[in-house]
Amino acid sequence: MDGVLITLLTAALIAAGQSFFFQWVRVQGTSMENTLHNGEILLVSRGGEYRRGDIVICRYPHRVDFSINFTASLSLTRHTIFVKRLVALPGDSVEIRQGQLYVNDRLVPNPPEMGSVPSDLKRLELKEDEYFVIGDNRRSSHDSRASDVGPISLSMLQGHVRKVIWPLNRLRDIQ
């Protein structure tokens, strides 16, 4: 009986830890290649300060996997999760000219593995609670550049990607 109780308590602690401190996310698609690859499983930490260049998981406005309404005031909603690079913070300006990303009028170099940004974006001043995210595979990423996404709020940022934990032959820290 003690073994069963210990197993149940351990499972409960792991579940609580995943809910509040960390979670696992599976990469779906190619928007973060060559940094992250389709099918990799990531360890994501919750909380902490967000900085330019962080790889984050986030949700977008109006993107829901499923929603169940129990009553008029009680529902369960699962938002679609995206993995992106945080490129600009509240108060920053963002602009894309001739395929080059500028944050606060400074060129953000596009490493060759990230690809160039295929279209221009007029200068945008981020408001107090606005963050700008872009996929590393900029030619194949649905992100803040899209009119149905745009800048996202702090509440839409769900955590920092810390490690690739699967497959084991690609186990690594994420900077």
Image (tube, rainbow, N blue to C red):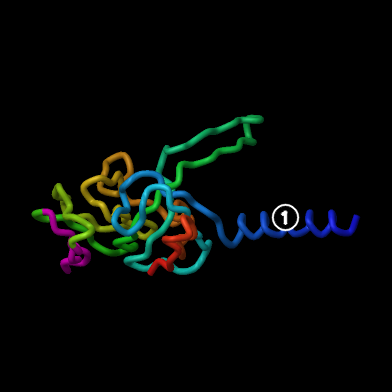
The residue singled out by tag 1 in the image is 11
Answer above or below: position of 103 versus 5.
below
Residue plotted at (23% across, 61% down): 93
Q: How many marks?
A: 1
Residue plotted at (25% across, 45% down): 140
Is residue 18 highlighted in magenta? no
Amino acid bearing label 1: Ala
Residue 42 visible in the picture: no
- Figure quadrant of the C terminus: bottom left
For residue 11, side relative to residue 129 (left or right):
right
Q: Nearer the viewer, residue 91 or 50?
A: 50
Residue plotted at (30% across, 53% down): 33
Q: Secondary structure at mark 1?
A: helix
Q: Position of residue 74 (x, y in %)?
A: 64, 36
Q: Position of residue 166 (x, y in %)?
A: 48, 56
Q: Nearer the viewer, residue 120 or 163?
A: 163
Answer above or below: position of 4 versus 66.
below
Q: Nearer the viewer, residue 150 or 66?
A: 66
For residue 24, side relative to residue 88 (left or right):
right
Most distant residue in the right direction:
1
For residue 134, side relative to residue 101 (left or right):
right
Q: Nearer the viewer, residue 83 or 86?
A: 83
- Figure quadrant of the N terminus: bottom right
Q: Position of residue 174 (x, y in %)?
A: 40, 66
Residue 60 visible in the picture: yes
Q: Which residues are magenta?
A: 99-111
Quarter of the image where one finds residue 60: top left
Quarter of the image where one finds residue 10: bottom right
Is residue 101 highlighted in magenta? yes
Most distant residue in the front direction:
169
